[in-house]
Image (cartoon, rainbow, N blue to C red):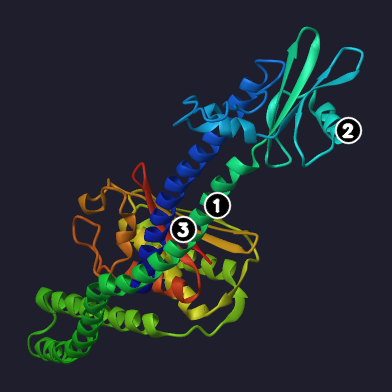
Amino acid sequence: MIKKLKIKFIVTAMVAISALLFLILATINIVNFSLVTADADRVIGMITQTENGFGEPLSAPSGQWQPEGRGRMGPDAPDTQASIRYFTFAFDESGSVREVHFRMSAISRDDAALWAESLKNKTRGWTRSIYRYSVYRKNGETFVTVVDSGRELLPSYRVLWASIIGSVTGLIVSFLVILFLSGKFVKPLLDSDKRQKAFISDASREMKTPLTAIAVDKEVLKERFGENESTRSIDRQVDKLFGLTLKLNELLVYERGQVEKEKFDLSSEIRDAVGEFKEIAEKKGLSVESDLEDKVELSGDRSLISKALRESLDNAVKFGKTFVRCCLKKTDDRIIISFANDADGLPENLRGGEYDRVFERFFKGAPNGEGKGLGLSIVKEIVLLHGGRVKATVKNDLFTLKVEL
């Protein structure tokens, strides 16, 4: 249980950190690439404003300084405009093509024309990874402009790769730190669990001697004064205490035990257990319902599974109000067993959806204090020994215990 809690803590912390990193880095990279896209579209818009595109770079007469463009950044800067590589081709309705702009050295004019023709039925987007294109109509012609944005995209890709490497490194470091801290966080729980197990072991051992003495003294009283209500009451209490010590010992054994597996008919085992508890349930005025799939086989410790089944049925019968229901079905490689019973309402100590508390040692959900608070703890330990899982749910005053094997 403590080990699972530690794993749950690590997983939860790592998921939270991963989600936060992903959100931050995704936002940064999306904004970064969106700005590059916006600049590329702006460049295309400036190119298509005139027939000459950007024209020739600005030049100044010898010995004179021109302030135009000083301090400008992006597409508005003359030096940037002079370095942009792009081409535009126009297509008329007959399919003939003419060159409008061509300032690109990475591709020939003929290849550029074929490339533009492949894009003329589209609208706008990215092509060949680093080229931004736009298609528009004017004076009966279809214009295709393609701009090389590789230089602008390079820093963005560097930021992307740096963020990926940084995130992976950060996650590894975070995992190591959380792994180290998780041991410190669960240590108080681990110490408490060890102390509780030690107490259970000592208590179950120490209780046997006085219980035996009480039982012997009770027999002496019965011989001297005969059986009466007091001796019968002592009998009942001694039986309860002996049952408690037996369950305490069983719980410790199950927590440390090993499973000796054998294949057996689980359907038959549950049917026998339901039959045993049917008479007890009917005496309490409970109807017993069962829906058991036939010939369901399980590989496990038959005696332990039988114990878990009877503890689950005992819990359902003990706290049932009008009925007890047991179901068994097999889906793919999972076997699902459920025990359900109606109740008089949710106990105050189970409100808020913390229904798995019923598996805690000594937890008592019944307001009248009935039960020892160990039965479902034993069920959980047996199910975990078999690699399964068990869950408790409450809905509309219907308590359901679901076991998956």
Cα–Cα span, label 1 and label 2 = 33 Å
The image's mark for residue 167 is: 3
Mark 3: secondary structure: helix
Query: Which residue corresponds to the image point at 25% horizontal and 72% vertical from the top-left?
Result: 189
Q: Is residue 293 left or right of residue 188?
A: right
Residue count near mark 2 (Cα–Cα under 10 Å), binned few <14, some 14–19, many ≥20: few
388 to 130, vertically: above or below:
below
Q: Residue furthest left?
A: 225
Mark 1: secondary structure: helix
Residue 278 seen: no
Name the amino acid, label 3: Ser
The image's mark for residue 110 is: 2
The image's mark for residue 303 is: none
Name the amino acid, label 2: Asp
Q: Is residue 120 left or right of residue 377?
A: right
Residue 62 seen: yes
Q: Position of residue 90 (x, y in %)?
A: 81, 19
Name the amino acid, label 1: Arg
The disc, 1 or 3, on the residue closer to the chain's N-terminal end is: 1
What residue is pinned by disc 1? Answer: 158
Query: Which residue corresponds to the image point at 62% horizontal and 78% vertical from the top-left?
Result: 263
Cα–Cα span, label 1 and label 3 = 14 Å
The disc, 2 or 3, on the residue closer to the chain's N-terminal end is: 2
